[in-house]
Image: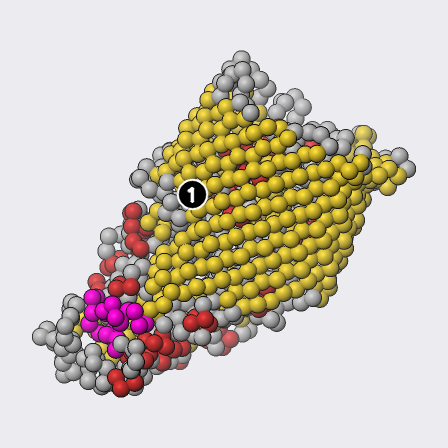
Amino acid sequence: MTQFQHIARSGTAGIALAAALACTAPGQAQQAAQPPQDSTAETSGETIVVTGSRIRRDPLDQEAPIAFIGQEDIAKTGLNSVNDVLQRLPSSGGGLNSKFNNSGNLGNPPDGGGVGAGAAEIDLRYLGSRRVLVLVDGIRYVNGASASGVPGSTDLNSIPESAIERVEVLQDGASAIYGSDAIAGVVNIITKRSQEGLRASAQVGGFGQGDGFTKSAQVSWGNGRGPTQIVVGANYVQQDGVLAGSRAISRFPAPYSDTCLDGGCSGFVPLGRFIVFGTPGARNDLTLRGPVIGRNPVYNPGNPADPASDFKAFTDADRFNFGPFNYLQIPVERYGAFINARQEISDSINFSVRGIWNQRKSKNQAAPLPFGFGPAAGLTPVLDAITVDATNPFNPFGVTLDASNTDLVYRRFVEGGPRRFNQTVTTIYGVATLDGSFDVGGGKWYWDVNAAYGRNKAKQTMFGNINSDRLRRALGPVADCTGDCVPFNIFGGVGSITQDMMDYVMFTQRDRSRQSTFSASANVTGSLFDLPGGPLGVAIGVEYRKLKGSFDPDPIVAAGFSSDIPALPTRGSYNVKEAYAELSAPVLSDIPFIDLLEFTGAVRWSDYSTSGSTTTLKGGVNWKPVQDLRLRASYAEGFRAPSIGELFGTQSRFDQSINDPCSTSTTTGQNWNNNTTVRANCIAQGVPAGGYAQANPQISVLVGGNQDLAPESSRSWIFGGVYSPGFVPGLSLEANYYDIKIKGAIQSVNAEITLAQCAGQNDADACALVTRAAGGQLTFVEGLLQNIAGIRTKGVDVNLAYRTRETGAGRFGFTWNNSFLTQYDVIVPTADGQLVVSREGTEQGSPSQAFPKWKSVGILDWDGASIGATLTGRYVSAIREPLADDNKLKARFYTDFQLRWFPADDPEAFGFALGVNNLFNVKAPGCISCDLNNFDPTAYDLPGRYYYVRASFRM
């Protein structure tokens, strides 16, 4: 453990916050930045609307745990994506980002939303991005699209950073306020509503290894204040890729390895793998000694591994290293533009329009296609059923290869080059709002009527795939291979597949998807009358939404003839009608031990065309026994209707890294080698008594939607408080305890759990989801979406902030924000009850997700007359890997530094910054059970120092 990690553990410094998070604690945010401007209307008086309530209030009240992140905070991080900034929140569980390179490597994940290649999503409390509601100026944003499914989450890469004034993150359930999806929290992106003059900035950066270069620029202009206000802007971001082969952690499938003998390499090899002849479970496992070009390989049936033949026994040294072909950081290019226009029609009525256009181009890359045939191949129905006829001119065995004599034949299609996936996603989003105010009984009421439309349209082109229908024909009887058909050579090893063969079987795959949202809403808020503690605030409103989504894979893929990931068209829609009411009742104030006592409540009725109607409630209390101390508690009911992809998503495949407990080569906990009960159960499930060796570490998991899904519901409690002592101006201490329980959670049971239940407990329900070939090879595990029993998570957030007044040496700031995960249980059904899987302090594996017990982020900040500096850092506690013999991923402490210069006489006119992230080049811990690159992209930085230069000006 490094010195810095010791410091972080002791808590004496806590210098662990990306600068973007200088405002993550609500108390700190109000000390370090100006109060946020109105998120739904212009400020009138001293009250505005803050995320978490529709009722206008003083933004300094801190009645809920909210993080405020402004443009200045984002600029201090050196990051080019607001999503990357949000993912550094201690309460963030990660989510998709540019460190994910899933296409071709993992297939379609079990959540029904597709790969999400190039997308960026935010996850709070490790509950998944589908349980975080994303708003733009208080109105729902359109869900993402990446041409591989219909996701139920928002792609933050579709929102131009130049449009963002600040981000408000509510870390509390809010379904009663905002409706479905707001179970873990709400991210509200506030756009620039008013600006005077021109603002522009540009940044370039890259890793010390000479790769991952990024450049960005953004500009915005506004005409200032007045009856007509216009703000327009644009931005551009280009991020180069970083190949896995350029970092020691990911050059081979085992962390920090330089050989396939350490495990993880693929059984799909360029020289071919042939598990043929003999009895099932004891067939010959062969590969070529080298490429055979210009003739057929020599095979000796009496001695399959005859040294005089071209075949030899397959060993782990023959496996294929797919690692260097992958990206650690994917290439992304984004263009964006926005407009906000507001016209004052009268003293009490305003009309405004907001528009966003964004285009994202991204790339994923995977190793050359693994393909083959045979009943134990576990690929696609077409490939698994292929037979190679005896008349195929390249067949060295002299007989037809079929299920009677063949388990599988594997080949790595290196002649076709790496699989390349190019995505283009175009977003349009517009809102029209009519808002105003009126007076009733001496009080002012505010109203607004909104109509919004958003659309994401995605296209993906894949290179390197094989049409399995043509492959079947080219491997079949030579008499049937006529016309443009070219007999295919799968037996000669690397270089034996000619250009003519490739031209016949290969195709360029073109997929597309689309999502759209239309919504209309009306809200009224004001004060009914005065209570002893202040005015009784109320808000009421109605909303209508219509969502549509579709995914159309390439026609060859839809016909079932892809040799990569299978997919079928998906199409669906639903609408929802809602009404809500919210109340804020300050019942007492300014009496001994009650500086303020306020009760809050909300109720929302929702009617879904797919899921029926429901009512959710929320209640809370705020008590200030003295002016410096605020205590608060809230209870919230949550509701999340199944998304289009979850309901209507067609069946596909997820390639999960799995250790089969029934394999003799397994490294999982209780297995064939160390547990007689497991061995007996495996034999009962069809594994030969002599055992079998798993042919490939990735196993096909059948995934897809489920039209019988019911909505999931939640109940959450939050207890906390904020202490801001008057005798220490600028100091704020905040603590919050949360307890969230989700019932009927929509997700699949992890295939590792299914296999463990089947092999360890002989669970009939689990075993029914497992498919094996005649020789025991694990070929498929079913993992369709269902309403599992539930999720229960608990934790504590502790935040400290201090900012000095102006001194002779400048102004200093310190923040320290922490999130402690004390419980995270996934409760899954079994044949005789339930199984509780505790995740806190562990790595889930595939799909990659870490659950550290402690995440800490903080900042030391100084601004003098013309220079400033920020020292930041981020701490992630140690975790263990239950699927890798409890391998320990040690704690990590990252340190960042930024130095700034600005003119003393006009600090806002120009600014220049130099910075480095991961100053001490801390290496990410090697993850054995993670599904790609030996690296968990939800928890750790990309290996290497990242240097950047930034300039900005205003005029």
Residue 311 located left or right of residue 118: left
Q: Residue furthest front?
A: 483
> Along the line of sight, which residue is nearer the eye, 904 or 5?
904
Quarter of the image where the C terminus is located:
top right
**Residue 480 colored in magenta in the image:** no
The image shows residue 355 at horizontal and vertical percentages of 62, 45
Report whether 788 appears left or right of 253. Answer: right
- Identify the residue shown where x is 28% and y is 66%: 413
* Location of mark 1 (residue): 238
**Total residue callouts:** 1
Residue at (65, 44) in percent of width and height: 354
Examine the rendered structure and indicate whether residue 20 appears above or below residue 831. Answer: above
| Position in image of residue 703 (x %, y %) | 49, 68
Depicted 409 relative to depicted 955: above or below: below
Q: Position of residue 205 (x, y in %)?
A: 39, 36
Front position in the image: 622 or 229? 229
Tell me which residue sits at (16%, 73%) in the image. Answer: 311
744 lies above or below 182: below
The answer to which image quadrant residue 153 occupies is bottom right
- Residue 36 visible in image: no
Q: Amino acid at mark 1?
A: Gln
Q: Residue furthest left?
A: 308
The quarter of the rendered structure image containing the N terminus is top left
Q: Secondary structure at mark 1?
A: strand
